[in-house]
Image (spheres, rainbow, N blue to C red):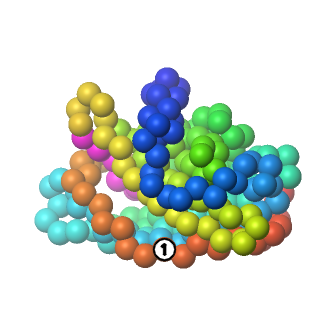
Amino acid sequence: MRLLLYCGALIVACLGLGLDAVGATLDELKGLSIEVNWDRSSIFGGVSRPVPQNGKIQIYVGLNGHIFEYNHLQQFDGQRSYSSINTPDKAISSTMPSGLVVMHAWTVEGGKLQLVAPLKEGFSVTSIAVDPVKMTCAYEYADRPDPQTGRVVTIHPTTGAPFQVMSRTSGSYTCSVRRGNIFASDQ
């Protein structure tokens, strides 16, 4: 699994996501809170209509470089929330409400904070470009298909059932940056 995550991260670094990088390094992100609220519409195999989804990502980059993540996803038939403490460039695992254990890793690539998460088939990439001087950010999400099958298959957030992702349409997002940890008192 680690090899898959590592290979996925390398592919992402090579392909990029198209966000204009502002060149933020991990050191420049230390002490910043970043919040992204997003929505999108996904079409899954076997589902007759698009599924609206929305979520919130809250990140605090600690002064020691650890990334404190608070993540929430909601769609019409389920939701999931999780939090984690990440060391950049090291994979960690989280347990979803369905009992499924998933791995993911945060990294800083090309001036962007990126989350790489393997799916059942393929992987997802969340990219946040932060300008620590202007205190602004930009967000982008992309699915990358499995190299062998060419498919993207995700897991339902509550039942654990596999769903093939046929397409996703990005909606809107807001992204904000503030100094200090504004999300939790456990740091």
- Residue 140 image offset from top left, x and y in percent: 47, 60
Can you say which quadrant of the picture contains the C terminus? Answer: bottom right
Q: Residues within 10 Å of mark 1 (few under 14, many from 20)?
A: some
Q: Secondary structure at mark 1?
A: strand
Decide: is 5 above or below 31.
above
Q: Is residue 176 left or right of residue 139?
A: right
Q: Nearer the viewer, residue 23 or 56?
A: 23
Single out the residue that lies furthest toward the top. 3
- Residue 78 image offset from top left, x and y in percent: 39, 65
Residue at the spot 50% in from the left edge and 53% down from the top edge: 126
Q: Is residue 138 left or right of residue 29?
A: left
Q: Is residue 32 visible?
A: yes
Residue at the spot 15% in from the left edge and 55% down from the top edge: 46
Quarter of the rendering containing residue 137:
bottom right
Q: Is residue 73 left or right of residue 35?
A: left
Q: Is the magenta region chiefly helix, strand or loop? A: loop
Q: Is residue 62 visible?
A: no
Residue segment shown in magenta: 151-159
Q: Nearer the viewer, residue 145 or 111?
A: 111
Tell me the amino acid under the disc marked 1. Tyr
Q: Is residue 94 left or right of residue 85?
A: left
Q: Nearer the viewer, residue 170 or 74?
A: 170
Decide: is 3 above or below 93.
above
Which residue in the protein does label 1 denote? 173
Residue at the spot 74% in from the left edge and 64% down from the top edge: 132
Q: Nearer the viewer, residue 161 or 88?
A: 88
Residue at the spot 24% in from the left edge and 37% down from the top edge: 150
- Residue 18 image offset from top left, x and y in percent: 45, 55
